[in-house]
Image (spheres, rainbow, N blue to C red):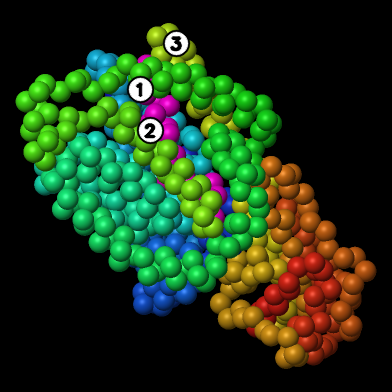
Amino acid sequence: MSTRRSVVALTLVALLLRVVTLDVQSYWSDEAATVQLLNRSFGGMLRGVFNGESTPPLYYVLAWLWTQVAGTGEVGTRLLSALISAATVPVVAALAARLVDVDAEGRGRAAVFAAALATVSPLTVWYGQEARAYALLMLLTAGSVLALLRALEHPSRGRLAAWATLVIAAMWTHHFALFIVVAEAGWALWVLRARALAAVGAAGVGAVALAPLLLHQRDAGRASFIAQESLGRRVAQVPKQVLVGYDAPVQTLLTVVGAVAVLVALAGLVRILRFRRAPRPPRVVVTVAAAGVRRPPPPGSLVVVTVAAAGVLLPLLAAAVGQDFVLTRNVVGVLPLVLALLAAGAVALPARMLGGAAVAALFATGLVCAIAVAADPIYQRDDFRAAVEAATRGAQGPRLVVADAEGRAPVRLYLGAGTRAVPAGVPVPVREIDVVKVAGARPGGARTTPRLPTDVVPPGFQLAGADTGDTWAVRRFVAPAPVPVDPGTLAPLDPGHPAVVLLRPR
């Protein structure tokens, strides 16, 4: 099969892998926040991003337009990310093909290897099924680096304009793209000099225009929870989560297998960086370069390695000076670059079978993780949908639903239209009170069914049911007649967590 057909086939596999299980998982809290924004008017959505989010607005603009047609159900909303994630596969393939200095067959192998890795890489699949900005971030960072390599090799206004457009879009998708763009702009100025000034200047204008939003969102403290966990622990989690995702069966074994495969591919990458050097330019070229035209293009592998390194090291430097937002999902924009580098390294190994075996091991690891997530709720997102369904199986009518702060948005979403939060001190007459508890995912820790108090019953009510799932628990209390209930008295139903009380009117 030709390289092009293989990449197309893998792209279709990637799309299928993401689409067929789009509605298996519940919305979790961040996705529910996205859906709440998308259910507003366009202006209301933009105001909501400014006032309630910690990321730029580009993804929400695209998603708002998309959901006007596709709707805001799990499939409709997530389908945009699935399509974007599948589209990333051929981009990563094209990027990898530019990193190896071999014959056409070798470049084709690199493209196919990279496409295979992008198809099943656990985090590309995970974020290809999530209504958030991360799939778009990965597509734009991969596309911008590919555009940069093209511009460095044969600079033209069109290629530089394409690069500038992609890096601006990346920055307006996620703030962490700025770290990658800084490195890309550095290479553009170093190699192209004056020819890159307009494109780099345009990217700079895009960054400056975004700065007020970035500072406002930072000062609002919406991502302050990140620094509550030690930086060392978060950094240590990144490679494991890249290899096997946030949770997986036999994850220690899979992590070891994946790590060995990565080390093998990196050995090939070292060979590329060591032996594929840019030729020493003749004296006349040096003279022209000194005049400000351009330097000879560097090896693509060197460019991608330094850009990927900047995407990880610059956030760590920012954390060292007090701006600590390092988290796997925030640095995931580097992932497509890493996959392309691993594919190129696998091709560069002197033993051809060894590189193929390394890619096959990573492919098998990713496929196992993808199947496990699709099949077992223990590896999935927080299952608020099942918990709310269990809580509302009783008779219809006004009811109070108690959740914690993390569950406020998804519980309210699944309770349906008209649901609202009710403050303490305002008694509400209801015949039913439901307590919803979902075990949040904790990297490296097993998820179990959460526990709710068995000896706490609101006055005037009696226990009507207690349901549990793999990751959630529900307790239902009913009264023979409506009882005025002060939401402020319901905290003991789920002690240890700030209670959020929602009123479902029907």
**Residue 198 highlighted magenta (yes or no):** no
- Specify which label sits upstream in the sequence, 1 or 3: 1
Judging by the rendered image, the residue that carries numbered circle 3 is 353
Q: Position of residue 397 (x, y in %)?
A: 70, 81
- Tell whether label 1 touches label 2 (CB within 8 Å): yes
Q: Secondary structure at mark 2?
A: helix
As drawn, the residue found furthest toward the top would be 351
* Distance from the alpha carbon under mark 3 to that under mark 2: 24 Å
Q: Where 352 falls versus 198 (above or below)? A: above
Q: Main secondary structure of the magenta part?
A: helix
Describe residue 191's horizontal placement relative to residue 361 as left or right: left
Disc 2 residue type (three-letter): Val
Q: Where 134 falls versus 474 (above or below)? A: above
Q: Nearer the viewer, residue 303 or 239?
A: 303
- Badge 1: how crowded within 10 Å, few (<14), some, or many (20+)? some
- The segment highlighted magenta reads 324-348
- Nearer to us of marks 1 and 3 is 1
Q: Secondary structure at mark 3?
A: helix
If the image is split into quadrants, where does the C terminus sit?
bottom right
Disc 3 residue type (three-letter): Met
Judging by the rendered image, the residue that carries numbered circle 2 is 305
In this view of the protein, can residue 443 be seen by the observer? yes
- Tell whether label 2 touches label 3 (CB within 8 Å): no
Residue at (65%, 65%) from the top-left corner? 406
Residue at (65%, 44%) from the top-left corner? 233
Describe residue 147's horizontal placement relative to residue 25 as left or right: left
Marks counted in the figure total: 3
Labelled disc at residue 273: 1
Residue at (59%, 52%) from the top-left corner? 25
If the image is split into quadrants, where does the N terminus sit?
top left
